[in-house]
Image (cartoon, rainbow, N blue to C red):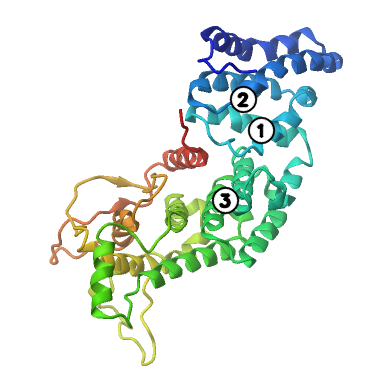
Amino acid sequence: MVSSSAPSVYSVQALTLLAEILAPLLDMVYRSDEKEKAVPLISRLLYYVFPYLKNHSAYNMPSFAAGAQLLSSLSGYACTKRAWKKEVFELFMDPLFFTMDASCAHSWKSIIDHLLTHEKTMFKDLMGMQSNSLKLFTSADQKPMLLKRQAFAMFSGELDQYHLYLPLIQERLTETLRMNPSPAVSAQMFLMFRVLLLRISSQHLTSLWPIMVTELIRIFARLEKSLQPDKDVSKLAKVVRVALDRNGPVNFSQAELDMYLSACKFLDTSLAIPPEKMPLFQMYRWAFVPEVDVSRYNGPENALIEGEQECTPHVVRVLEGIQQRYGELNGLSEESSTEHLEFPLLSQSSLSSITQLLPFLRTLCCSFQAPPPCSQPVAYLPVADYPAASSHIVLSRLEDIIENEFLDSMES
């Protein structure tokens, strides 16, 4: 049992020392044909370590981190899996699994990767799990939390480690989308999409892009519709709504805000990854961000044919909708800025108001258009460098942002 008092500094030091020396020491002591003899010893040791890994309290985090480091080093040897695989899977399915300090994430990525690598059918079984098998969660949380764990499983692996499972992954995603997903499920879907962009090479994602883009369009269209002004409301009702909107996004639940932020982060990730690494997305980019300033374009075929409608990118529609409903009320008018911007642009973990997306949307509206002629001086616009100077730095930042996004805040 883990004591309710603060963990002993000596136990933390002991766990840390074991994490550094035990696995390589056992590897030297036992020959290749004797590795199985180490399992009983490791099982007895981990019997006293797992209680630390089940306690996600802030005061236990030093012991939790040291225990995770020890388990990470031991699980790297396939012969040890009988000593920990059952308990690790139970910990992975625990509702508090993601409640940990950011310093522990690397160890747990290694542990989950070892679990899925040493157990050949584990990843397939995980992707085939039904959400109602997560008995410890409420029924509303089962599907999004299963999706989150499936995404983390892929995130823990290497590039293209699971590309052979893409037909199964696509089948599960399609099933989920067919069932009219809730905002919480949609938010986790976009997180999984972002993991797929980082863990699967572009040539393997061909069949997934239509699914991902269609879902992104659906969510943007939903946001655009919710921002449209009410047509059939009385003057008094408008005054009441204005007064309410002044204090916050009363039209959006927190789950909806999380969904819209997650969708914008997927768009941000798609734009941040260098075009040469994401060639297929370039065919869809025009639907989301403006690439030509129509007001300044005087080239051929500028006039619309009768009956045609100008195609306005989704980012522009959402920006205009937020500004109409919230902009002037909340004092969020256009302001000049000299800040140097780089992709990815979004790193916040949550929204308290839909208006917090305004800087992101404004930047996207300006970053992909050609600069105006010198004869047309304009005020400074928030433009991000595109494409980024260093693809390595961009991909590293995306890794860090997504890794932190999996983690839940801790309570002392």
State whether residue 110 is above or below residue 212: above
Q: Nearer the viewer, mark 2 or mark 3?
A: 2
Q: Which residue is mark 3?
A: 192
Residue 363 relative to residue 220: left or right: left
Q: Which quadrant would the N terminus be assigned to in this image?
A: top right
Give coordinates of residue 79: x percent, y percent.
79, 23
Quadrant in the picture for residue 203: bottom right
Quarter occupied by residue 122: top right
Q: Earlier in the sequence, mark 1 or mark 2?
A: 2
Residue pictured at 61% horizontal, 18% vertical: 2
Q: Secondary structure at mark 1?
A: helix
Q: Which corner quadrant of the image does residue 53 belong to?
A: top right
Mark count: 3
x, y percent for residue 139? 63, 53
Residue 382 or 408: which is nearer the viewer? 408
Asked which secondary structure carries label 3, the reply is helix
Q: Residues within 10 Å of mark 2 (few under 14, many from 20)?
A: many
- The amino acid marked with disc number 3 is Met
Viewed as shown, does residue 205 lie left or right of 367?
A: right
Q: Name the secondary structure under disc 2.
A: helix
| Residue for badge 1 | 91
* CA gap, disc 3 and disc 1: 21 Å
Tell me the residue that label 2 is attached to. Answer: 53
Direction from residue 337 to residue 109 in the image, left or right: right
Residue at x 42%, y 56% (from the top left corner): 257
Question: Type of residue at label 1?
Answer: Leu
Q: Is residue 129 above or below residue 407?
A: below
What numbered label is drawn on residue 330? none
Q: Pinpoint residue 107: horizontal percent, then vertical percent.
A: 58, 27
